[in-house]
């Protein structure tokens, strides 16, 4: 009997949408253990849920029953009209399209209202809708469908408590759930691993990355080419160009530009990007970079490397930057100038003010110096903070005028034999070495959350010290990439 649980929706859509995850999980392919960041997320989620549970002192916690008795207990308690059930189990065995299946769901709460029940799940996500978190919507709709199978009546309502503390109603939709369940059944029953293109941001947080990425590299899969998106990779597979070599053998710029691939609900031609895709494919095959034109970098004696560390919006109401890192490089090297947000109520504002003070002192010493950053995160958050706290002396506006994003300059002038132009990949390519064995944006967030939670000052200082080393090395890495790029400009 095929088993389908609410977790399957999560596997299909989180951290990113991928059908292959369902198949691999069903086949028992080994998954990497949760990262430090994922463990922090789980812990925060459990704490948030426990806080909500504490608002229902009358709740019956179904976890206190043996696991094989929880379903029977749930049914009995609902029939008795129990006001609040925590971690109930809903279960039904029935065929779907002739496939004998067992469907199991464990919503967080059943809350009695009038003569029925509300089904409520507690989530850390700030936005609970189909666009941002389809897995949450499907899970609740699945619980609604299951509830009706078990009790013969629909629940009163489906709702999610989101990360901002709002109760979000979720519309019931049996048709959508059944379509999802059919898709899951099909994926679980496939006899062969289906083709699923790898993608840098798609695979980075997935537990099967160590399974998929090396396979794609060995096969020289077209999906590894920087300009090739998921839909185009799948289309190229269909057209006999599964590998990068096949792509350059079977297509020229004309034929590739005319190839149509699914794009939303329509089809779209590859168009003008075709020539660049083929060029990048050849670079991947040769392993040799190609300079398209000298990178355009304004000449100055000094430059500030500028890098922010921030909380992901779904974990922090404020979308907070906890570290504003700056350091001057060039003819002379300045000292590392981090502005770390404090841990008190005004910590966020204090971090911002310290950053403005640092920037002001840099301007006083070096005049209108470029602030070099990688990608648009710094620009976006500078604007957010001006909106949040203002910029009375115009220092942030001056930083804004002097920003120089190195990523588009590198990406548009040098074709690299890489699948990603993330700073971490490009710095490795140019030979930059870090001192830390573990590092990264998510790692840093996990350390910062640990620092905010500990009451021990020594531990907190140690954790902040590790984050500072990471940020300082980010700045040094940006400078290393900058110098490598600048050498091509001359
Ligand atoms: S590593 Fe990528 S392709 Fe493989 S299962 Fe995960 S998301 Fe899908």
Image (spheres, grey):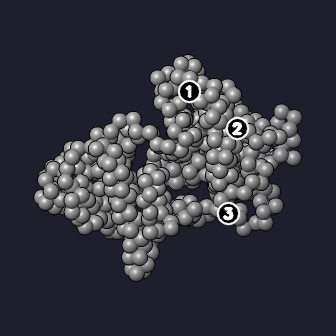
The one of 285 and 175 positioned closer to us in this rendering: 285
Where's residue 80, x and y in %?
74, 55
Residue found at x 35% / y 60%: 476
| Element marked by disc 2 | loop
Q: Is residue 472 left or right of residue 255?
A: left
| Residue density around tag 1, few if under 14, some if 14–19, many if 20 or more, within 10 Å | few
Mark number, residue 60: 3
User: For residue 411, which numbered disc appears in the image?
Assistant: none
Q: Relative to residue 146, is residue 468 depicted above or below?
A: below
The residue tagged 2 is 195
Between 147 and 447, the one nearer to me in the picture: 447
Badge 3 marks a residue whose secondary structure is strand
Q: Which residue is mark 1?
A: 264
> As drawn, is 219 to the left or to the right of 365?
right
Q: Residue at x 21, y 55 (%)?
A: 302
Q: Nearer the viewer, residue 171 or 7?
A: 7
**Is the CB atom of the residue marked by disc 3 within 8 angstroms of ligand 1's nearest atom?**
no
Label 2 to label 3, Cα distance in Å? Answer: 45 Å
How many residues crowd around disc 3 within 10 Å: few (fewer than 14), some, or many (20 or more)?
A: some
């Amino acid at each position: 009997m095929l088993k389908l649980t609410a977790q399957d929706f999560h596997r299909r859509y989180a951290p990113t949408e991928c059908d292959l995850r369902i198949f691999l999980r069903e086949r028992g392919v080994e998954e990497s253990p949760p990262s430090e960041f994922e463990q922090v997320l789980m812990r925060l989620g459990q704490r948030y849920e426990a806080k909500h549970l504490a608002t229902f002192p009358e709740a019956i916690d179904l976890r206190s029953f043996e696991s094989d008795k929880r379903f029977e207990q749930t049914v009995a308690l609902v029939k008795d009209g129990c006001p609040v059930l925590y971690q109930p189990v809903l279960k039904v065995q029935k065929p779907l399209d002739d496939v004998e299946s067992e469907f199991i769901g464990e919503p967080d709460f059943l809350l009695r209202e009038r003569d029925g029940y509300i089904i409520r799940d507690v989530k850390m996500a700030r936005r609970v809708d189909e666009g941002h978190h389809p897995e949450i919507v499907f899970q609740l709709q699945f619980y609604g469908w299951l509830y009706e199978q078990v009790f013969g009546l629909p629940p009163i309502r489906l709702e999610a408590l989101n990360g901002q503390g709002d109760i979000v109603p979720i519309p019931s939709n049996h048709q959508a759930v059944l379509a999802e369940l059919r898709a899951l059944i099909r994926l679980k029953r496939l006899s062969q691993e289906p083709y699923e293109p790898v993608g840098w941001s798609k695979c980075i947080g997935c537990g099967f990355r160590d399974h998929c990425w090396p396979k794609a590299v060995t096969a020289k899969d077209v999906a590894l080419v920087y300009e090739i998106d998921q839909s185009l990779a799948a289309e190229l597979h269909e057209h006999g160009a599964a590998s990068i070599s096949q792509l350059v053998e079977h297509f020229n710029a004309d034929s590739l530009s005319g190839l149509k691939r699914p794009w939303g609900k329509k089809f779209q031609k590859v168009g003008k990007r075709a020539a660049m895709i083929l060029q990048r494919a050849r670079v991947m095959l040769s392993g040799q970079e190609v300079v398209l034109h000298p990178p355009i970098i304004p000449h100055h004696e000094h430059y500030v490397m500028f890098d922010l560390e921030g909380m992901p919006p779904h974990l922090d109401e404020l979308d907070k930057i906890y570290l504003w890192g700056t350091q001057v490089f060039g003819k002379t090297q300045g000292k590392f100038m981090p502005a770390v947000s404090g841990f008190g109520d005004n910590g966020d504002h204090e971090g911002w003010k310290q950053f403005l003070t640092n920037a002001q002192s840099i301007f006083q010493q070096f005049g209108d110096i470029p602030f070099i950053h990688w990608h648009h995160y710094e620009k976006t958050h500078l604007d957010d903070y001006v909106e949040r706290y203002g910029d009375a002396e115009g220092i942030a506006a001056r930083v804004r005028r002097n920003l120089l994003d190195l990523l588009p300059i590198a990406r548009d002038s040098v074709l690299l034999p890489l699948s990603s132009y993330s700073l971490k990949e490009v710095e490795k390519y140019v030979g930059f070495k870090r001192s830390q064995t573990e590092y990264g944006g998510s790692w840093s967030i996990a350390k910062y959350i640990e620092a905010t939670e500990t009451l021990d000052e020594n531990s907190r200082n140690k954790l902040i010290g590790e984050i500072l080393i990471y940020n300082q090395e980010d700045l040094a890495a940006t400078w290393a990439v900058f110098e490598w790029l600048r050498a091509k400009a001359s």
